[in-house]
Image: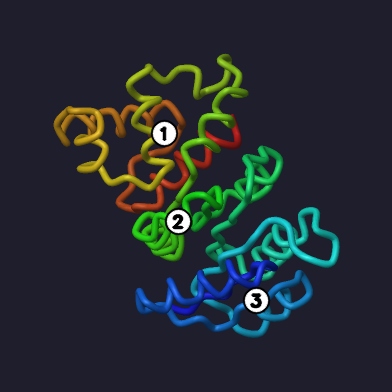
Amino acid sequence: MRVVLAEDLFLLRDGLVRLLEAYDFEIAAAVESGPELSRALAELRPDVAVVDVRLPPSFTDEGLQCALAARRETPGLPVLVLSQHVEQLYARELLADGSGGVGYLLKDRVFDADQFVDAVRRVAAGGTAMDPQVISQLLSRRSQDRPMGRLTPREREVIELMAQGRSNAAIAAQLHVTERAVAKHTSNIFGKLGLPPSDDDNRRVLAVLAYLDRG
């Protein structure tokens, strides 16, 4: 699996390269600035991009804007964004195009190697990997008169765990219910969000995107 990594701090960038290579990822490029990231994404077309929000030269949202531009050129390009803090505007921008393969993690999560690597793999496979703190802050601003307001408290718990990339089995274990119960809740969620029956696993991603971004 080919990765383009963008992080301006040398020690963190080097550590991420070593970590990903230890888990058999191929580092197609490891860059430190926005212009370098744009070139790498355009020329290398990686399986997934792992991108710090703030990169030189602006140190504002350079990394995110480069990733969004690349997704416009290559729709659905998997992008996992890393940030020091929960920045709701950035998270919403990433989700706004409705494509799968997106993630937003706080940098603290990088120190849990298994969790971080699992997030990279899920995003590369077209899934979502949203930090629980990001989800919590996004959901706190959702209007209750929108479709998401029709979800029951249990359905909200289920979709929050879906947003983290959990499988039905993992959700069942977390909530201490059966997988059958989780499947029923998931079916109800799809119905309430207007997602028709389909064999496409991407419907889980669409449900998460609708819940977190659209209303």
Q: Residue at x 45, y 82 (%)?
A: 26
Q: Is residue 75 above or below residue 135?
A: below
Q: What residue do we see at 80% from left, 66% from top?
A: 56
Q: Is residue 52 above or below residue 187?
A: below
Q: CA distance from mark 1 to mark 3?
A: 30 Å
For mark 1, what is the residue? Answer: 160
Left or right? Give the position of 152 relative to 75.
left
Label 1 Cα neighbours within 10 Å, binned few <14 / some 14-19 / many ≥20: many
Closer to the N terminus: mark 1 or mark 3? 3
Amino acid type at image mark 3: Leu
- The mark that comes first in sequence, 1 or 2, is 2
Residue type of the residue flagged with mark 2 = Phe
Q: Position of residue 163 (x, y in %)?
A: 43, 41
Tell me the residue that label 3 is attached to.
41
Which numbered circle lies on residue 111?
A: 2
Residue at 53 percent across and 54 percent down: it is: 102
What amino acid does circle 1 point to?
A: Glu
Q: Do the residues under discs 1 and 2 have CB atoms within 8 angstroms? A: no
**In which image quadrant can residue 1 be found?**
bottom left
N-terminal-most mark, 2 or 3: 3
Where's residue 198, x and y in %? 33, 47
